Image (cartoon, grey):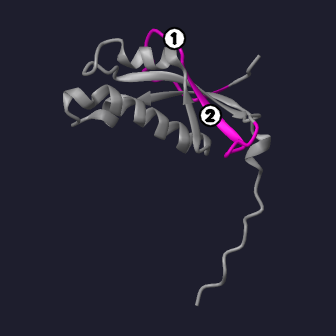
Amino acid sequence: MAPPKTAKPGRSALADVVAREYTIHLHKRVFGASFKKRAPLAVKEIKAFAKQAMGTEDVRLDPQLNKEVWKQGIKGVPYRLRVRISRKRNDEEGAKHRLFSYVQAVNVKNPKGLHTTVVEDA
């Protein structure tokens, strides 16, 4: 029989209030989706990416990011999108989660080939 699992002594995510810039390859994430479901699926994939990258359940999207995804219509989702994901503390009264991720679009000419970078929030 396997020994019982114990909590791993790691770093607390609360101390990690950080912002990073990622390039999300949306084309591979919406590949095969029917045209009328592409932009809504892209928004869901961005949320799933942020949840996985930052380890937070609560993910909030900036309205400008939504406009960037929908700019070319429901079926013209951009191939790649450069986003800034910020992990922040949730100061709301009675909040379910202590941290949330805020996803914003970053204006770049060509997001292809850019690496993940840590951003200093001012």
For the residue carrying disc 2, how many other residues have a C-alpha within 10 Å: few (<14), some (14-19), or many (20+)?
Answer: many
- Residue 12 in percent (x, y) is at 77, 50
* Magenta part, dominant SS: loop
- The local crowd at label 1, few if under 14, some if 14 to 19, many if 20 or more residues have their Cα within 10 Å, is few
State the CA–CA distance, disc 2 to disc 1: 19 Å
* Amino acid under disc 2: Ser
Q: Where is mark 1, residue-wise?
A: 107
The quarter of the picture where residue 111 lies is top left
Question: Element at badge 2?
Answer: strand
- The vertical placement of 21 against 122, above or below, is below
Locate residue 32 relative to residue 12 in the image: left or right. Answer: left
- Which residue occupies 44% across, 22% down? 81
- Find the magenta span and give its range: 93-118
Instruction: For mark 1, give the secondary structure.
Output: loop
Task: Report the amino acid beneath label 1.
Answer: Asn
| The N terminus sits in image quarter | bottom right
Q: Earlier in the sequence, mark 2 or mark 1?
A: 2
Q: Is residue 80 magenta?
A: no
The residue under label 2 is 101
Q: Are marks 2 and 1 in contact (CB under 8 Å)?
A: no
Residue 95 picture location, percent across and down: 70, 42
Which quadrant of the figure contains the C terminus? top right
- Where is residue 41 drawn, in percent x and y? 34, 33
Q: Nearer the viewer, residue 62 or 21?
A: 62
